[in-house]
Amino acid sequence: MNKSRTWGLVVVIIGVLTNNYVYLHDLILDRHEGMILLGWKAGIGIIVTLAVIFIGLVLLLRSPAGETAKAGETAD
């Protein structure tokens, strides 16, 4: 796995975990009887985490497809 693909995977995982934390933070710490009440700070957090996930996906998609095949050869 090359560095671009590895970093893309790491960034996507961090973005997904952070996004889940933003949603669960209200349930865990604020205790609003099972309801998720998102404020403006959570809205900014969600936008930032979605941008991080998107950047990770771009890194994954832009990584080279065949690392073992040389130029002009097909991978069998």
Image (cartoon, grey):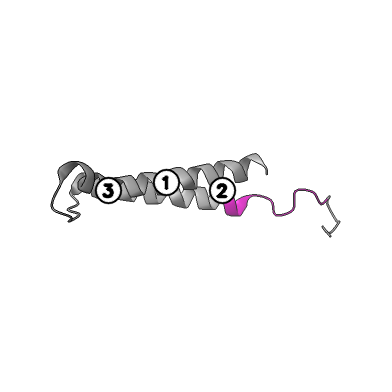
Q: Between residues 49 and 14, which one lies in front from this camera angle?
A: 14
Q: Between residues 72 and 2, which one lies in front from this camera angle?
A: 2
Query: Which residue is most to the front?
Result: 33
Q: Between residues 3 and 76, which one lies in front from this camera angle?
A: 76
Please give the label number shown on residue 15. 1
Does the magenta-highlighted stretch encompass residue 31?
Answer: no
Name which of mark 3 and mark 2 comes first in the sequence. 3
Give the total of numbered labels: 3
Please give the label number shown on residue 7. none
Report the residue at 27% width, 48% height from top. 24
Tell me the magenta residue range.
Answer: 59-69
The 10 Å Cα crowd at callout 3, few under 14, some 14 to 19, many 20 or more, is: few
Give x and y (percent) for residue 58: 53, 52
Does the magenta-highlighted stretch encompass residue 64?
Answer: yes
Q: Secondary structure at mark 3?
A: helix
Tag in front: 3 or 2: 3
The quarter in which the N terminus is drawn is top right
Task: Determine whether, in the image, residue 67 is placed left or right of residue 60.
Answer: right
Disc 3 residue type (three-letter): Leu
The 10 Å Cα crowd at callout 1, few under 14, some 14 to 19, many 20 or more, is: many
Tell me if residue 64 comes above or below residue 14 in the rendering: below
Q: Disc 3, disc 2: CB below 8 Å?
A: no
Report the residue at 52% width, 52% height from top. 57
Give x and y (percent) for residue 64: 69, 51
Q: Secondary structure at mark 1?
A: helix
Q: Between residues 70 and 38, which one lies in front from this camera angle?
A: 38
Report the residue at 38% width, 51% height from top. 50
Please give the label number shown on residue 24. 3
The 10 Å Cα crowd at callout 2, few under 14, some 14 to 19, many 20 or more, is: some
Residue at the spot of label 2: 59
Name which of mark 1 and mark 2 comes first in the sequence. 1
Name which of mark 3 and mark 1 comes first in the sequence. 1
